[in-house]
Each structure stands twice: as structure tokens, then as C-alpha cells.
């Protein structure tokens, strides 16, 4: 007879006392709802004290202290010190804000915790439904295929990986790039987000294979220069593979001439990938759809839902027009994953066959709940409101003698700076950099920065459903007040 050495009681991570766990869980929900309700009264960002830094570096806990004590530490040392992106006056980078419903959806998704490679389960149908809705929203054909992934970077990498597979002219999956043959070349503009560089590195194409084409005064890719670059590469015996267009560039919100790029790709036999990280969702609005016209002509399209669909991190989408090509780029077979006719795996593992991840969380749930609970109408209205807010800031900048624009405002990003007669070049750059840091450190607002034509810009991006027009007034007043003070201080 075998004897079992079973600890008593047997070990588990479920609570020993469900009632007290329930009380704690309710408290957590109440605290977070209250935190979100009162965001406006909190600083947009606050630096961490030495005490916080000290507290968050400690030896590996060998013995647990229990959930309640750990939660109290979260409240004291973690919750007050985020980078601030949920706040109404956070305008930095392109960071989404999350929603109370999204927070609860993430809790439900984690509670349910399904394995999202596929399987015969309702969560897989939810993701398929979300993908079908998103396909519609951006004007892709119903036959397209897609996948929800971590973020815009990952969605773009996958799009480029499909392009590489589809247009390399040989079996990249079999041979890799370790073979003799013409260099594969990818074209993007100088305004393309940094994911493109990381991707060509990761996909083995190398940075030397990424041509960064110049932009015009509106920061849109110069199509003439693109055509010339493709021709020059062909003359050199290289293999042009793919053009990356952008709907909503990270610096200024510019959108390339997407129909023009689509036509050129068609003519030249190149894959057309669009990075629509935030811009693509402008297509949700009837009024803004013309700004991103041509999205629907891409071979692959990447966009975030944690940016301009306001969902909590992290969730983004890649769509590929030709579902068979998408699958061919990633599908794999392993005996332990083989589909059977009945049982749990009878749904197959369609999502695992459309990307790199096998195990994925149920990030589709928050998108499904958002679309059903809020509807496209409200989400599109918020996107329009954000664009109106950018225009309002632009008006306030142009009306103010001490402020100036550094770029056009085609969508939801405003790049501007404080100016002072007799100061320019590095001196003015230094004033604006100091101004930015003081604004952030004051907790009043968090713009970010960029450099345009050598000029340091305060950069405000509107992807925030909490921002009010009065927040923009407060920002303008603070910029002018702080700029004047810095100049006076010399
Ligand atoms: C235009 C653009 N592309 C790609 C990305 C990367 O997206 P993510 O941060 O979700 O990886 C961003 C991020 O701001 C972006 O603005």
C-alpha cells in the first residue's frame, strides 16, 4: 500500500475563510470606485518619496503576511503613485485612461481566467465577435482575420511578420533569413513610431532594411520620395517587401495619404501595412472617417483599444485582409494541441494560429462589454470630443501672444511652446523643457514633449474621456504663468 503524505489541511490558494475574503474584495471594489470618482481632486502625478522607494524594495517574502495587510500596503505605497494616465489633465504620449466598467470587466476576466488559444468555450466566441465588430468598424471585409494582442507594438510586429511571410518570395518560416538572396526592404516615414525599428530588428530584417522616407510640411510621407526609393532599391537588386503607412503619427497626429500608398503598393506588388495605433478608431466617427480614409485598403492593420477606445491596458488588435495568409504565417501543429472532433479542444486553437502567443488572457471581455454597454455612438462621440478639445487648445494657443504652434493639428495632438521676444534656439528650448517638468511636478497637468525641427515642443494628446474643456483652460493658464516665471528667474 502506498501512503500519501498530505499536509493537513491540504494546500490551496483559495481563502480559508470565504466570508472575510468577500468583505475584503468588496472593500477593494469600493476603494477603487471611490478613487476613480475623485480623480479630479487628486494630483495628475506626484513624485514618490524616499519612503515609498524604500518600502518597495524588500527581501523576498518567505512567509505570507495575508491579503489584508498586503492590500493596505497597496493603498499606501502603490495606488497614489501611478504615472497619472487616468487623470483628466494627463495629456502625455498616447496613453489610454481605462474605465470603471473596463476595470470590472478585467476582474471578471481574471476570475473566469479562460485560456484564450481557442477551445470550445464562450470566451472564444466573445473574442471572435469582438474581432468581427472591429473588422466592420474599420471597414475591412468580413472575411478578414484578426487577433487581440498586448499592444500596438505587438499588433504591428505581427502585421509585419505576415507581410514578410507573404511577400518574401520564399518560405521564410522554413529557411529564415539565413540564406543567400536579395535583402528584403521595408518602407516607412521618418514619423513612423519606434515599433518599426524594433520589428525589423526582431524579424531578422535588420535596421539597414528599413527606409525612412521624408515627410512633407504636414508630416505625411512624401510619396514621390517613396517611389524613388523603391525604384532605386530594385535597381540595386534588392527586394522591396512592404510599405508601412500611419494613421495618426505619434508626434503630431498626421495621417499619411493612405489611398495613395495603397495604389502605389498595388502597382509595385508590395504589402501595405497600416499602423493605426490610435488613428484607426477615428473611423468610428462619421465626421472623422474621411481623415483616415484608405484604412480599409490595407493588407494588414494594427490599432490599440487601450488608446482611443479608452480600455484598460492592455489590448490591441491586428487585422489581416487575407485570413489564409494570416494563418499561414503562424499556424503550427503539435500532437498535444491537435484538434479533436468533440470535447474541449473541438473548437480548435484559432487564436494560437494567428500569432505567437499560445496562452492569452480574456482581454476580449472588456472590449465586448464596452461596445455593448456604451455602444459605438458614445465611443465615437468621445473621440469627436477629444478632437474638439485639441482644436480648442489650438485656438487658445493661436489667440495667445506668448504661445505658438510647432505643427498643424490634423487630429488630436497639439504641439506648441511658450515663446518670449528675443529668446529662441537652445535658450527657448531650455525654457520649455523646464516648463514641462515644473508642470508635471506641480501635479496640475501632464503634457509630454517632442522635438520638431530642433524645437522643443510641449505635446498634448487627447485620448482621455475624462478631460473637460475647463482642464484645457487650466493647462493654458499654467503654461503661461510658469513660462513667465522661468523667464523672470533668468
Ligand atoms: C502611432 C503609434 N504606433 C505604435 C504605438 C505603440 O503602441 P503600444 O504603446 O500600444 O505598444 C504608439 C504608442 O503610442 C503609437 O502612438
Image (cartoon, grey):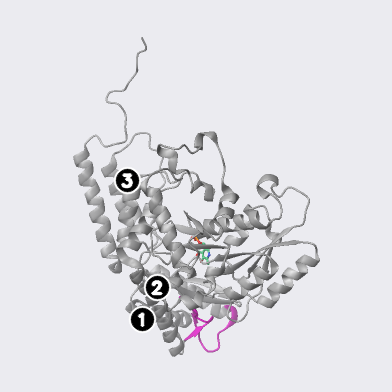
Which badge, 3 or 2, is on the more N-terminal residue? 3
**Is label 2 in a helix, a strand or a loop?**
helix
Q: Where 430 sits versus 195, above or below?
A: below
Is any part of residue 306 visible from this angle? no
The answer to which of 309 and 63 lies nearer the viewer is 309
**Is label 3 in a helix, a strand or a loop?**
helix
Determine the CA span between mark 3 and mark 1.
Answer: 42 Å
Residue 263 position within the rendered picture, expressed as x and y whole percent measured from the top left = 63, 73
- Which dot, 3 or 1, sits closer to the camera? 3
Residue 405 position within the rendered picture, expressed as x and y whole percent measured from the top left = 51, 83
Name the residue beneath numbered marker 1. Answer: 473
Name the residue beneath numbered marker 3. Answer: 111
**Is label 1 in a helix, a strand or a loop?**
helix
Name the residue beneath numbered marker 2. Answer: 383
Q: Residue at x 44, y 45 (%)?
A: 118
Judged from this view, the residue extending furthest toward the front is 341
Q: Where 111 sits versus 373, above or below?
A: above
Q: Residue at x 40, y 43 (%)?
A: 120
Amino acid at each position: 500500500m502506498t501512503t500519501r503524505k498530505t499536509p493537513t489541511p491540504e494546500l490551496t490558494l483559495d481563502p480559508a475563510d470565504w466570508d472575510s475574503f468577500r468583505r475584503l474584495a468588496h472593500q477593494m471594489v469600493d476603494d477603487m470606485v471611490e478613487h476613480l470618482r475623485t480623480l479630479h481632486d487628486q494630483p495628475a502625478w506626484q513624485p514618490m518619496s524616499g519612503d515609498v522607494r524604500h518600502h518597495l524594495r524588500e527581501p523576498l517574502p518567505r512567509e505570507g503576511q495575508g491579503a489584508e495587510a498586503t492590500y493596505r500596503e497597496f493603498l499606501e505605497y502603490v495606488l497614489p503613485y501611478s504615472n497619472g494616465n487616468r487623470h483628466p489633465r494627463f495629456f502625455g504620449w498616447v496613453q489610454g485612461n481605462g474605465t470603471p466598467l473596463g476595470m470590472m470587466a478585467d476582474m471578471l476576466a481574471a476570475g473566469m481566467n479562460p485560456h484564450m488559444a481557442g477551445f470550445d468555450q464562450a470566451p472564444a466566441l466573445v473574442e471572435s465577435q469582438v474581432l468581427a465588430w472591429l473588422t466592420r468598424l474599420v471597414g475591412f471585409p468580413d472575411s478578414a482575420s484578426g487577433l487581440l494582442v498586448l499592444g500596438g507594438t505587438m499588433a504591428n510586429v505581427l502585421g509585419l511578420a505576415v507581410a514578410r511571410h507573404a511577400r518574401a518570395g520564399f518560405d521564410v518560416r522554413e529557411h529564415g533569413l539565413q540564406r543567400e538572396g536579395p535583402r528584403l526592404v521595408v518602407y516607412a516615414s521618418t514619423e513612423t513610431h519606434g515599433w518599426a525599428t524594433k520589428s525589423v530588428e526582431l524579424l531578422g530584417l535588420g535596421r539597414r532594411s528599413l527606409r525612412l522616407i521624408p515627410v512633407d510640411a504636414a508630416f505625411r510621407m512624401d510619396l514621390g520620395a517613396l517611389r524613388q526609393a523603391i525604384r532605386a532599391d530594385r535597381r540595386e537588386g534588392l527586394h522591396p517587401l512592404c510599405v508601412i503607412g500611419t494613421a495618426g503619427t505619434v508626434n503630431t497626429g498626421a495621417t499619411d495619404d493612405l489611398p495613395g500608398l495603397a495604389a502605389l503598393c498595388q502597382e509595385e506588388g508590395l504589402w501595405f501595412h497600416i499602423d493605426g495605433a490610435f488613428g484607426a478608431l477615428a473611423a468610428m466617427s462619421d465626421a472623422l472617417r474621411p481623415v483616415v480614409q484608405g484604412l480599409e485598403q490595407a493588407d494588414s492593420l494594427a490599432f490599440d483599444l487601450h488608446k482611443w477606445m479608452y480600455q484598460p491596458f492592455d489590448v490591441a488588435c491586428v487585422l489581416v485582409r487575407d485570413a489564409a495568409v494570416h494563418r499561414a504565417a503562424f499556424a503550427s501543429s503539435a500532437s498535444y494541441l491537435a484538434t479533436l472532433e468533440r470535447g474541449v479542444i473541438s473548437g480548435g486553437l484559432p487564436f494560437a494560429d494567428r500569432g505567437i502567443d499560445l496562452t492569452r488572457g480574456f482581454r476580449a471581455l472588456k472590449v465586448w462589454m464596452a461596445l455593448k454597454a456604451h455602444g459605438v455612438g458614445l465611443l465615437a462621440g468621445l473621440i469627436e470630443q477629444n478632437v474638439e478639445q485639441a482644436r480648442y487648445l489650438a485656438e487658445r494657443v493661436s489667440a495667445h501672444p506668448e504661445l505658438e504652434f510647432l505643427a498643424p493639428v490634423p487630429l488630436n495632438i497639439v504641439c506648441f511652446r511658450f515663446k518670449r521676444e528675443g529668446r529662441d534656439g537652445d535658450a527657448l528650448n531650455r525654457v520649455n523643457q523646464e516648463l514641462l517638468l515644473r508642470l508635471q511636478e506641480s501635479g496640475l497637468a501632464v503634457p509630454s514633449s517632442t522635438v520638431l525641427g530642433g524645437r522643443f515642443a510641449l505635446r498634448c494628446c487627447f485620448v482621455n474621456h475624462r478631460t473637460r474643456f475647463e482642464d484645457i483652460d487650466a493647462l493654458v493658464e499654467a503654461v503661461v504663468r510658469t513660462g513667465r516665471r522661468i523667464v523672470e528667474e533668468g
